[in-house]
Image (cartoon, helix red, strand yellow):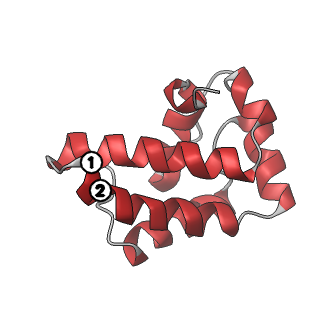
Amino acid sequence: MKFAIRTAALIVMMACAGCNTVPEGQPDASAKTMDRNAIRDAAKEFCVRRVVKENNMSMEAASNGCGCYANRTASQMSRQDITDFRDKGYFNDATAKRAMLALELCNVPKPN
């Protein structure tokens, strides 16, 4: 499976780790079937791409921090957090808070 990283759902997921507003519209259909591992893998891939683009870093340099971020965030998601993500296509408030902390703990630059 090509990761659903190209989907709007994952772009919203990462972009809204620090959002104060809720995204509008329907979640991408691929979010509805993602399990914890798929969320983790897609979050890492999107994080690497975002960090490389926004911070002019190599993919290798971004990979370690983004892997740390994705592992921390996905491993701390409860069943309800995963259900909420599948239903809405973005992190709920609890997961978004943990994601922002994971960015900081893993030394990943926050989204611009």
Give the CA separation, mark 2 to mark 1.
5 Å
**Percent of width and height locating residue 33:** 80, 33
User: What's the residue type where badge 1 is placed?
Assistant: Met
Find residue 72 and report its image quarter.
bottom right
Secondary structure, mark 2, is helix
Report whether 42 appears left or right of 36. Answer: left
**Percent of width and height locating residue 18:** 46, 55
Picture residue at 77% right of the left edge, 46% below the top: 35
Residue ID for mark 2:
62
Picture residue at 37% right of the left edge, 64% below the top: 64
Find residue 28 and report its image quarter.
top right
Residue at the farthest bottom position: 105
Picture residue at 33% right of the left edge, 50% below the top: 111
The circle on residue 59 is 1
Q: Is residue 39 above or below residue 11?
A: below
The circle on residue 71 is none
